[in-house]
Image: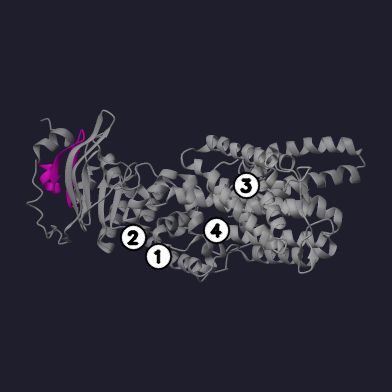
Amino acid sequence: MLYREAGDFKTSYVADSQTFPIKFDRVGYYVLLGFAFLVMPLIINDYWANSIVVPFLIYTIAALGLNILIGYCGQLSLGTGAFMAVGAYGSYKLMTAFPELNIVFVIIIAGFITAGVGVLFGLPSLRIKGFYLAVATLAAQFFLIWLFTRTAWFYNYSPTGMISAPQREVFGFAVTGPRASAVSMYMICLCFLVISAWLARNLTRGSLGRQWMAIRDMDIAAEIIGVNPLMAKLTAFAVSSFFIGISGALLFAVYLGAAEAGEAFGIDKSFLVLFMVIIGGLGSIFGAFAGAFFLIVGPVLLKLLLVNGLGWPTDLAAHLEIMIIGALILVFLILEPHGIAALWRTIKEKLRLWPFPY
Amino acid sequence: MLDTQAASGEDGYITPDGRKIGGVAMEMRNITLRFGGVVAIKDISFDIRWGEIRAIIGPNGAGKSSMLNVISGFYHPQEGEVIYKGFRRPKMRPYQVARTGIARTFQNIALFEGMSVLDNIMTGRLHHMKANLFQQALWWGKASREEDENRAQVEKIIDFLEIQHIRKTPVARLPYGLKKRVELARALAAEPSILLLDEPMAGMNVEEKEDMCRFILDVNDEFGTTTVLIEHDMGVVMDLSDRVVVMDYGKKIGDGTPDDVRNDEEVIKAYLGVAHE
């Protein structure tokens, strides 16, 4: 009854095309933002930051990026892990080469570098489609990881072959390195996520977003009504890789602290982010959040429930956790093949009319 | 073969219902299109004049759709040239042709199924939106202003075609007749100089056909849009069009006003059918 649009008349096109047309959503969004920025920093502790919140924020950025490429532009990619590695190694090289450069700029520049690499590996998309493109991006995955493990220049000739993030500060708070506190790690990831989501929303609501979706839905018709397929596909690769690069840089610099390309950014990362996008819902900003929440927070919550709640032994819980998550994925995909976002949309449509659907 | 030039001087002509038709907008000169050994279009020439409704008719496989694809730049003819707005058109990609003011609809509806009606029509206004990636990302300056202005234009077309009630509906949920109308709206949104309609009335019931006819005439009347259409319903073609090109087996067998064409021996034999008494 609270959730309705009857009587809420829009008098301008700006008001009509806003992100949250229903007042309840709008209020909810601001409450959530306020909670994330004002309340969470006060209650967050190391355990919650490290096991749930920070990885959730970082992977959501990656899922946002991949969702633009797959969900909005319809270009299948399996190179996410490698593009995250580009962001990570890019930020590492920048941090060590320009120690004075603020970490925020380092991460943004790493994003732009990844965008460039993404465009390069997006070039095959002009000629090949679907699964064949996925295989082509798989080549990027293996090639880039090989490059980062074999070329010593990328890890500054360190004997372990690992890259490790030196301490960097934002406004006097350490955000990377061993002395970074949970709150500062949380805050920098949150800021990057909120801005990324805002940028992604803007890009997908406007002319460029419509070009991407046109290419996704019917590429020949799109070209005939005037979409330049070259530009549309390459911008999708660039924007997508930009976000993925930022998430890779954050994952390495803020969360992991030290990383090795093959281990941290292997093909399993590509699949993890791909599953997030599919389970969350293709072509939806909310879907990126939902998918990352499901696959990052879900297992942890399940473990808490099984071990702390029911008192099961840890090893049994660990195995069951994997099985239950797997089963849940199947259940979700059977119930709603278009992901959690579609489920959410259906619920909202029903809510609008509730309790008098006729 | 009929002589069109008699009916149309360099300065255009006046239709029986009093509309003034302008000079030549596009001229097809000796177009030949081959697919391997198959000749789809064989040495065809005709012109399209500003403001007229030009129909292309012919039996299945006559090469009508291929002709439309040549005009919209999807196929490149092996021989012949397209003179558009007085200049020979170089070989262009379809999206470049679209930018020169040619919009079209498709025989099998080619809407973007995953998008709403509004987004589909807004996609048609692509060329009127110039904000770059960064402006769009920040939704700043030109990006938001353009979105608003173009939305206002799109709303005019939505009003014109009477599809207000489905504005926000995903296209995939619409019935066939409405999809055809949305497709017309998307083509109109581009504010084209030449509008190409590939069987706009295929698969429609009588009522929907009447609606569509009215829209085509209104568009021509209101915006003065030059329209080229392919259609099988002879009643519709004869009523709507100012001049008709008749094709058969890739060749042009007739060209002229609907009355001329209807009485032409060769056309009757090939297409309209001979009356057996």
Residue A169 location, quadrant = bottom right
Task: Give yes or no for residue A286 being in the magenta stretch.
Answer: no
The three-letter amino acid code for the residue at tag 4 is Leu
- Going 79% across and 68% down the picture, which residue do you hit? A172
Question: Is disc 4 on the same chain as disc 3?
Answer: yes
Q: Neighbour class for label 1 at 10 Å: few (<14), some, many (≥20)?
A: some
Q: Which residues are magenta?
A: B242-263
- Tag 2 secondary structure: loop
The three-letter amino acid code for the residue at tag 2 is Glu
Height in image: A333 above or below B170? above
In front: label 3 or label 4? 4
Q: Earlier in the sequence, mark 3 or mark 4?
A: 4
Instruction: Determine which of the numbered discs, if any, sits on residue A281 in the image.
Output: 3
The three-letter amino acid code for the residue at tag 1 is Gln
Instruction: Determine which of the numbered discs, if any, sits on residue B191 in the image.
Output: 2
Q: Is residue B53 left or right of residue A209?
A: left
Q: Position of residue A177 (x, y in %)?
A: 80, 56
